[in-house]
Image: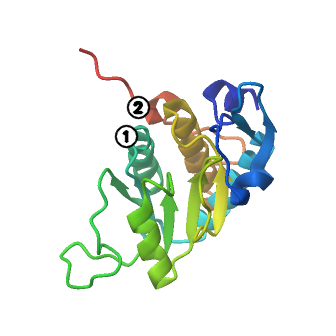
Amino acid sequence: MEQYLASGVHIGTRQKTGAMNPYIYRVRPDGLFVLDVQQADERIDLAARLIASFEPEDTYVVSARQYGQRPVSKFGEVTGARISAGRFIPGTFTNPSYENYIEPKLLVVTDPVADEQPLAEAATIGMPVIGLCDTDNDTRNIDLVIPTNNRGRKSLALVYWLLARQVLRERGELAPGEELDVSLEEFETKFEEE
C-alpha cells in the first residue's frame, strides 16, 4: 500500500463521474478526489488473471498519453502483448483492407479519453476491454475498471509493472513470491535532459 501511495496511484482529479463514484475513497480539502487503492490492488489482480487467460499476442495494450508510452512498451516486452504507444491508427481493428489490420481478443487502454479510437473500435467488434480509469473517466465500453491516476508517470509505471509481474505469476512463468527481473524504474518515463 505504501508503494501505491508513494507513486500517487490514489490521486484523482477535481472532477468525478457517476461511474467512478464506487472507486472514490474520499475528497481532500483541496477538492481532489482520492481513489481507493485497495480496489486498485484487487482489480490489478483480476486484470492479470484475465490477461493471462489469453495468448500473449492476443492482448493489445495502448497509450496515447506520453507518460503511458514507456510503461506500455515495457509491459509488451515483458509479457509478449502487442502494444501501441503513441497514435493509434483508425481502422486497426475494424478495417480488414488496412495493411496493419489485426484481430486481438483483449484490449487494455491507459486512458479512455486519450485512447478513445481503439476503445470505440473494440466496442464495435465486441472485444473485452480493461481500462485504467481516473475519477473523471467515463467507463462505458470498459469491462474491467482499474481505478488509478492515469496521468502520473510514477503511477502508470507502477500499475503496468505490477500488472506485468502478476500476469507472469498467473501464467506460471514467475513463482508466487518471485520478483520481475525488470525494475520498476525501467517502466518509468524519464524526463529528457536538456
Closest to the observer: 55 or 32? Answer: 32
Compared with 47, 153 (above or below) is above
Would you say 145 lies left or right of 114 here? right
From what the image shows, is residue 86 above or below residue 9? Answer: below
Q: What amino acid is labelled 2 in the image?
A: Thr
| Cα distance in 3D space between marks 1 and 2 | 8 Å
Q: Position of residue 106 (x, y in %)?
A: 51, 71
Q: Where's residue 188, x and y in %?
A: 46, 32
Q: What is the secondary structure assignment of the residue under circle 2?
A: loop
Residue 164 rendering spot, x and y as whole percentages: 55, 49
Relative side of 91 to 116, left or right = left
- Circle 2: is it few (<14), some (14-19), or many (20+) Cα within 10 Å? some
Look at the image and tell me whether residue 153 can be seen: yes
Q: Locate the N terminus and report the quarter of the image it occupies.
A: top right
Residue hosting label 1: 66
- In the rendered image, the quadrant that contains the C terminus is top left
Give the residue at x 58% y 52%. Answer: 132
Mark 1 residue type = Gln
Residue 96: percent from left, percent from top = 26, 85
Residue 121, by quadrant, is bottom left
Label pair 1/2, CB-CB below 8 angstroms? yes
> Which residue does the numbered mark 2 point to in the structure image?
189
Mark 1 or 2, which is nearer the eye?
A: 1
Above or below, comparing residue 86 to residue 5 in the picture: below
Q: Which badge, 1 or 2, is on the more N-terminal residue? A: 1
Secondary structure state at the residue bearing disc 1: helix
Q: Is residue 183 visible?
A: no
